[in-house]
Amino acid sequence: MQFDIRSYFKNGKTPYTAQFSEDFSKEDFDGSRVTDPVVCSFEATPDTDGVAMQLHVQAAADAECARCLAPVRETYDFTVDYFVRERDLQDPDFELPMDEKGCLDLRELAYQELIFKIPKVLLCSPDCQGLCPICGKRKAAGCTCRPADDAAPADARLSILKQLLS
């Protein structure tokens, strides 16, 4: 979806609103997947100094817990405010995704904001204990392994850690 911000600076006298949904199922979110449509609303309001804009995003991301590999679903519901002056459009470092005709790409804007909201590491719970290094089961699911203090780790590559702790 496009918003012609250059034209809005010239002709925009009333607030502009748009509601749209986007499919981000093929986009990369660092291990998370956004399979459901992302619901967005956009509003632009003329101001004496420029244009006040607001983007509201509702999304859900699916991933695996970084510690125990359990499925995790996180929902996001956030609003981001922007203020643009007409002279900002001439700035080569203008940060909003805009094409050469002066149209703001609202899909790309929603993607950029969402990628900053979804953490790189998702956990099923803040106190997740992860997987047992001996049996591979989730510790919270009832792993009863009790390694002896002097036993070698199940993975020989971890034996150096035991030496460092001694």
Image (spheres, rainbow, N blue to C red):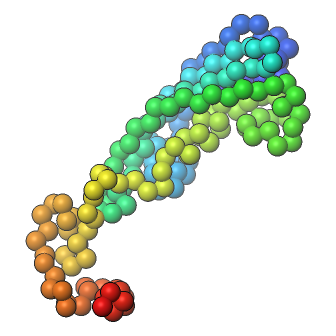
| Residue in the foreground of this view, choosing between 144 and 160 | 160
* Residue 54 visible at all: yes
122 sits to left or right of 38: left
Does residue 14 lie above or below 112 as drawn? above
Q: Position of residue 116 (x, y in %)?
A: 56, 45
Q: Is residue 142 left or right of residue 116?
A: left
Give the image location of residue 149, x and y in percent.
Answer: 18, 86
Total number of numbered discs in the rendering:
0
Residue 107 point in image, percent of width and height: 63, 34
Q: Position of residue 103 (x, y in %)?
A: 77, 28
Q: Is residue 21 visible?
A: no
Which residue is at the far top? 14
Decide: is 106 above or below 121.
above
Position of the C terminus, as image quadrant, is: bottom left
**Looking at the image, which residue is at 40% across and 38% down?**
75
> Image height check: is 1 above or below 7?
below
- Residue 150: image quadrant is bottom left
Quarter of the image where one finds residue 109: top right
Quadrant of the frame with the N terminus: top right
Residue at 16% from the left image edge and 82% from the top image edge = 147
Seen at 68% across and 28% down, the residue is 82
Image-based side of 75 in relation to 111, left or right:
left
Instruction: Identify the residue shown where x is 52% and y is 43%.
Output: 117
**Depth order, front residue of 24/102:** 102
Q: Quadrant of residue 86?
A: top right
Q: Residue furthest front?
A: 166
Measured along the vertical axis of the image, is residue 132 above or below residue 92? below
